[in-house]
Amino acid sequence: MPASSARRRGLAVIAALPLLTVAACGYGSQAKDDGAAKIAAGAKKIEGLDSVKIGYFGNLTHGTALVGVQKGIFQKALGATEVRSAVFNAGPSEIEALNSGSIDIGWIGPSPAINGYTKSGGKNLRIIGGSASGGVKLVVNPDKIKSLKDVKGKRIATPQLGNTQDVAFLNWASEQGWKVDPQSGKGDVTVVRSDNKVTPDAFRAGSIDGAWVPEPTASRMVAEGGTVLLDESTLWPDEKFVITNIIVRQQFLEEHPKVVEALLKGSVETNRWINAHPDAAKEAANKQLEADSGKALPADVLDPAWKSIRFTDDPLAATLNTEAEHAVEAGLLEKPDLKGIYDLAPLNEVLKAEGEPTVDDAGLGAK
């Protein structure tokens, strides 16, 4: 496969996509109020702010947030400004929470970030940092699919119409020369939109033949007898592509720049700790998953899933731009103007202070 073609990946949730519910009873009731217990004696509020509200998914690809909360790294960076968190199941609901002011900062995939930015005319959010790369795989039933060409004619699940993995699979199928209607999912291969929570059950029941999904869903399917046919990272230069960004509500960034910078400092410290202590970090992430959902991941799911994710401060802006281009090609997004979607100045200030290399916005910084 030519390198230029292999890089083609998609994203962008179309405007008609329904909002999915937040974990448990909605993002309001999922807010965590345990930050105060971790506030150090004598700590001071930053900019006099009582609290900062953050959001993330209960996915290992959001490991920076999971570990940062679990280890108290975010709270330490924020002093006496309490970190309050909410857990989400899908990007649209997190964007809705950001728009309403229910959260200030969030960890989120490229698709909803782009969609939220473009739908608001570039006025509701900024991407302020990176978090993770990789962690997406095509897992199949080895009895039905033994090679990439065998995918043709089969039923392959993706998490949601127009989400990052959905468009990535549609784009990959197009590269194979197969035709699929992006809306109905019907064609040379049938795309079944299925919530990540139920996809392993559908796979076990035989109603799908495979799935293009993020971790830990991919490893859950492997535990059910599936085989990894393709790791999406192998299709990208240097095997890096954005899977999780950090976004901020623009008004919050304007009103509380020092709070944003402090949280970014916590994120950088968390990523450094994750990469220096991968086993301990994996356990911390799993502990937070258990705290948030009531259930930890078993070792046969946790271990392979964690290994496939790279944690990075770099938002990998060039790959987000490529993904947006191919969402357009997939027919799920009108050509967007992404100029201004990034504001990496606060992150680069943190990185400079830490003696780390600064990161690039690929020409998509403030206008």
Image (spheres, rainbow, N blue to C red):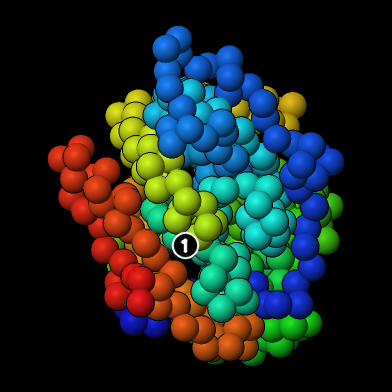
- 208 w.r.t. 188: above or below: above
**In the rendered view, does 87 fall on the left or right side of 322?**
right
Q: From the image, which quarter does the C terminus lie in?
A: bottom left
- 363 w.r.t. 73: above or below: below
Viewer can see residue 154: no
Residue 116 lies in what quarter of the image?
bottom right
Residue farthest top in this picture? 41
Q: Residues within 10 Å of mark 1 (few under 14, many from 20)?
A: many
Return the x and y of residue 347 as percentages of the image width and height. 31, 50
Q: Nearer the viewer, residue 125 or 142?
A: 125
Query: What's the residue at 67%, 39% (across, down)?
Result: 86
Return the x and y of residue 333 as percentages of the image width and height. 60, 83
Residue 279 lies in what quarter of the image?
top left
Residue farthest left in this picture? 355
* Amino acid type of the residue tagged 1 in the rendering: Arg
- 18 w.r.t. 59: above or below: below
Return the x and y of residue 83 as percentages of the image width and height. 55, 31
- 10 w.r.t. 337: above or below: above
Q: Which residue is mark 1?
A: 126
Q: Nearer the viewer, residue 302 or 22?
A: 22
Q: Secondary structure at mark 1?
A: strand
Query: What's the residue at 77%, 62% (across, down)?
Result: 19
Q: From the image, which quarter does the N terminus lie in?
A: bottom left
Q: Nearer the viewer, residue 68 or 61?
A: 68
**In the rendered view, does 240 fall on the left or right side of 326?**
left
Viewer can see residue 77: yes
Query: What's the residue at 32%, 51% (across, down)?
Result: 346
Query: What's the residue at 27%, 43% (across, down)?
Result: 350
